[in-house]
Image (tube, helix red, strand yellow):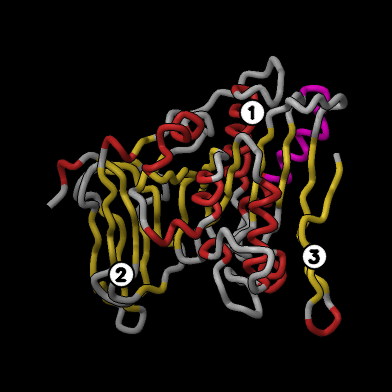
Amino acid sequence: MNTTEIFTSELPVGERLSIKRTRFEPKKVTGKEKRISIVSGIHGDELEGQLVIYLLAEWLNNNSEKLTGIVDIYPAVNSLGVDTITRGFPLYDVDLNRTFPGGANEFLPGQVVHALAQDVKGSAIAIDIHSSNIFLREIPQIRINKEYSPSTLPLAKELNCDFIWIHDAVTVLESTFSHTMNSMGTKTLVVEMGVGMRLTKAYGHQLLLGILNLMKKEGIIECKDDFIVREAFNSEVGEVYYLNAPKSGLFVPALDHCAIIKKDEKIGDIVDPLTGTIHATLFAPNDGILFTLREYPVVYEGSLIARIFGDNNGKN
């Protein structure tokens, strides 16, 4: 195991930005090893990935004899954002995941993402782990650009996530880490799970199991362990439904996150604490799985309350 600084820059008031990567590799390196890169913290307020990377590093430390490939971990790409509990890159107020591929002579955020992309380049596989924001909780899911799904979908099925969301190409996504790396030939998956500024231990262990399973299937580790993974729902065989708040107020959920629901089942109420009245009751528009649910209870008209994946028999 060795830790390397992949980018550094002097900052105002005598501080220094430092972004680091730790590499795990077998005792005898031949140069033919397959490499996987696990990236987290592109958004500074998303911490779920740091737990996953810690658990993976702990496993690798305790099972170094099983390692046959190379594992690179990048726990906190946006280290300034982590320090200041902000999604974007401080001082510039930009989203690093809308700044790729960047360049060595660009403004500071562009230099950061360029350094990351160049360091990850050459990996066979990359996994970019994100949390939701503070307003929503997400079940462990993988988001894939349809353009790259023929090569990435088989990998996604090994990652022990609950849902695989395949989306059409959108221009804004061309400036993301995943699009940049896929275009460079590194098969890259985006994992979204949990909630912003928090850790969900169960999800962390769930994804760890999936990463180990993928690494075993890809020959990066060799072991007799059986990593039993769940079969994910796939958006190609159903519809994603959005449920938005019709009124402002306090959202009180009636269901647990990740519930399997039926059409017309109650999702929750939007209430008014001042008058003791219910402004609106929300019901499921279709059968399916509740894969996104409002975490922060204060809502305004139009706020996203839930996303449900299911068949299209309930679609209006």
- The magenta span reads 53-66
Magenta stretch, main secondary structure, is: helix
* Figure quadrant of residue 36: top right
Please indicate, yes or no, whether residue 68 appears anywhere in the rendered image. yes
Frontmost of labels 3 and 2 is 3
**How many angstroms separate mark 3 from mark 2 (CA)?**
48 Å
SS of the residue under disc 2: strand
* Figure quadrant of residue 88: bottom right
**Dot 2, crowdedness within 10 Å: few (<14), some or many (≥20)?**
many
- Specify the label residue 96 is tagged with: none
- Which residue does the numbered mark 2 point to in the structure image? 270
Using residue 12 as the reference point, say whether residue 90 is left or right of it: left
Residue 200 located within the stretch drawn in magenta: no
- Specify the label residue 215 is tagged with: 1
What residue is drawn where x is 35% and y is 84%?
Answer: 274
Please indicate, yes or no, whether residue 163 appears anywhere in the rendered image. no
Question: In this figure, what is the number of numbered marks?
Answer: 3
SS of the residue under disc 3: strand
- Which residue does the numbered mark 3 point to in the structure image? 8
**How many angstroms separate mark 3 from mark 1 (CA)?**
30 Å
> Which of disc 2 and disc 3 is earlier in sequence?
3
Return the x and y of residue 18 as percentages of the image width and height. Answer: 79, 64
> Which of disc 2 and disc 1 is earlier in sequence?
1
